[in-house]
Image: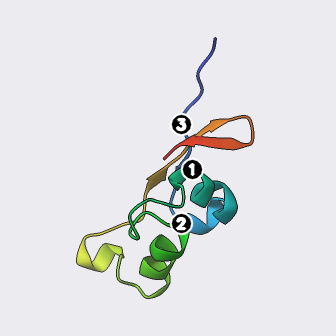
Amino acid sequence: MTLGTPPFNQSIETIKKESLNQLFGEDSYPFMSYEYLHALEKSNSVNTEIGWSPFHLSIHDGDVISGF
């Protein structure tokens, strides 16, 4: 098996919302949802000026996210 470079995403928008929420599950913490992470980015609550940069690592099995 050959492993490639893991995909790092500098925006949550590069990840499919449905896939990420399915991975997190319905009973996960509210902070572990696509909507929450997206809101942080869009409101500029996370940005390089304050020392927080979005840098999401997602692991895929084909088209399915198997880790985040």
How many residues crowd mark 1 within 10 Å: few (<14), some (14–19), many (20+)?
Answer: some
The Cα atoms of the two marked residues, 1 and 3, are separated by 17 Å
Q: Nearer the viewer, residue 39 or 44?
A: 39
| Residue 32 in the image, given as x and y percentages of width and height | 43, 63
Check the image and report above or below for 18 versus 60.
below
Q: Nearer the viewer, residue 12 or 25?
A: 25
Amino acid type, label 3: Pro
| Residue 48 in the image, given as x and y percentages of width and height | 33, 73
Residue wearing tag 3: 6
Mark earlier in primary sequence (3, 2):
3
Residue wearing tag 1: 23
Instruction: Please identify the quarter of the rendering in which residue 2 is found.
Output: top right
Discs 1/3, front: 1
Check the image and report above or below for 20 versus 42.
above
Mark earlier in primary sequence (2, 1):
2
Residue wearing tag 2: 11
| Residue 24 in the image, given as x and y percentages of width and height | 51, 54
- Secondary structure state at the residue bearing disc 1: helix
Amino acid type, label 1: Leu
Check the image and report above or below for 6 versus 36.
above
Check the image and report above or below for 24 versus 40.
above
Mark earlier in primary sequence (1, 3):
3
The Cα atoms of the two marked residues, 3 and 2, are separated by 15 Å
Farthest-out residue, front = 27
